[in-house]
């Protein structure tokens, strides 16, 4: 509570920057899960076609982008990732 609220009845303004960071963090959580799944399915497809590690390497880079996105979202968001994000990213 602030003194303005106690004395005058004026509620404090919400911090829009903090809300923006939380929304950005949630977006990063969802996008990271999508990148991890896209990389996984690309790895399956390239391994099925060529069966060489060079073909799987590109898919691993896509998954690495997803993991980096997850940790960026974790830094930006004040709250923890939802359970389904943890479960899907395993």
Image (tube, rainbow, N blue to C red):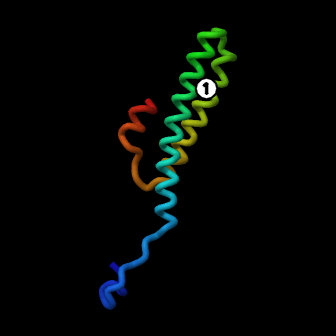
Q: Quadrant of residue 84?
A: top left
- Kindly indicate the quadrant of the structure image that contains residue 63: top right
User: Residue visible at 48% across and 63% down?
Assistant: 18
Q: Which quarter shows the N terminus?
A: bottom left
Residue 45, percent from left and from top: 59, 16
Quadrant housing the C terminus: top left
* Residue plotted at (40% across, 53% down): 79
Q: Tell me the crowding category of disc 1: few under 14, some 14 to 19, or many 20 or more residues within 10 angstroms, Cα based.
A: some
33 lies left or right of 52: left
User: In the rendered picture of this protein, how many numbered marks are placed on residues?
Assistant: 1
In the image, 68 versus 16, the foreground residue is 16
SS at circle 1: helix
Q: Position of residue 88 (x, y in %)?
A: 42, 32
Residue 85 lies, in percent from the top left, at 42, 38
Q: Position of residue 42 (x, y in %)?
A: 59, 22
Which residue in the protein does label 1 denote? 60
Give the residue displayed 36% in from the left and 84% down from the top.
10
Taking 42 as reference, is 75 left or right?
left
Identify the image quadrant of residue 66: top right
Residue at the (40%, 48%) spot, across then down: 80
The residue furthest right is 54
Q: Work out whether 5 lies above or below 26.
A: below
């Amino acid at each position: 509570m602030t003194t303005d609220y106690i004395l005058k009845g004026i509620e404090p303004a919400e911090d829009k920057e903090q809300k923006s960071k939380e929304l950005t963090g949630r977006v990063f959580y969802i996008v990271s899960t999508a990148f991890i799944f896209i990389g996984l399915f690309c790895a399956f497809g390239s391994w099925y076609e060529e069966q060489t590690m060079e073909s799987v390497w590109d898919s691993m880079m896509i998954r690495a982008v997803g993991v980096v996105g997850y940790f960026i979202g974790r830094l930006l968001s004040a709250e923890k990732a939802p359970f389904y994000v943890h479960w899907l990213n395993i």
